[in-house]
Image: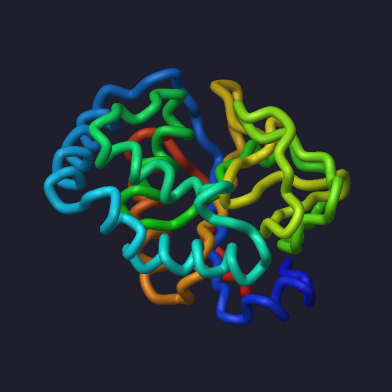
Amino acid sequence: MISPEFKAVWPDFRGKAVSATVKNTPYNEDLWKEIEQLTEQYRATYTPDTVKEIVPIKATRDAYRKFGKDPSRYRPSNEGLCRRIVRGLPLYQIDTLVDLVNVISIRHGYSIGGFDADKFVGDTLTLGVGKPGEPYEGIGRGLLNIDCLPVYRDAVGGVGTPTSDNERTKMDVQTTHFLALINGYSGEKGLQEAADDMVRMLKAYADAADIEVEDYK
């Protein structure tokens, strides 16, 4: 799942894959009560400057630099979400699965890819490094320059980076087969807690069944 070129640059990477059969909905009131509570706690704890020092966020930024990408220009999604909250802006409300992934990312600090697994082509995802001119359409961002970005690929091409997942494999309200990839650029510590929290929330808010959690490195 992880390419040799990626391992050569960032050998300490660890990941958790969480998959499940789910029922997505446009909005979940109980989930948003949890999000609003977390938002209040977060704003009382962090500032835009201290967000960058959260261990998984700092490690993701350091990895970007090592791969050759500017983390301030191509901001990782975990940092972007957290900065949005501490700046006093509301979290985007998309749908239950997307909102759930976002809250796990904020609470635990990880960049997390959330996918509709039925939209993948082929049986394997590989984590590699973006190439110059490689086509990639980020969700809500249009064409994204993924040269030197970490990127998950299926048989067709890129599906996810820490900056933005791809339009082609994004979740929507029809999604029934969910896959989340929790990216541990800071190593293994804290990953299990994030995965356990995701499993809890999937059961509570998306009627999840057939849940599987796998390690990859």
For residue 200, above or below residue 144: below
Percent from the top left, x then y, of residue 140? 60, 26
**Residue 89 versus residue 38: which sits nearer the camera?**
89
Q: Residue at x 30, y 27 (%)?
A: 90
Q: Place residue 193 in its image quadrant.
A: bottom left
For residue 6, above or below residue 60: below
Quarter of the figure with the N terminus: bottom right
Quarter of the figure with the C terminus: bottom right
Whether residue 79 is visible here, answered yes or no, is yes
Q: Residue furthest left?
A: 44
Q: Place residue 84 in its image quadrant.
A: top left
Q: Residue at x 44, y 18 (%)?
A: 26
Percent from the top left, x then y, of residue 94? 45, 24
Q: Residue at x 63, y 30 (%)?
A: 141
**Residue 207 versus residue 136: which sits nearer the camera?**
136
Percent from the top left, x then y, of residue 4? 78, 76
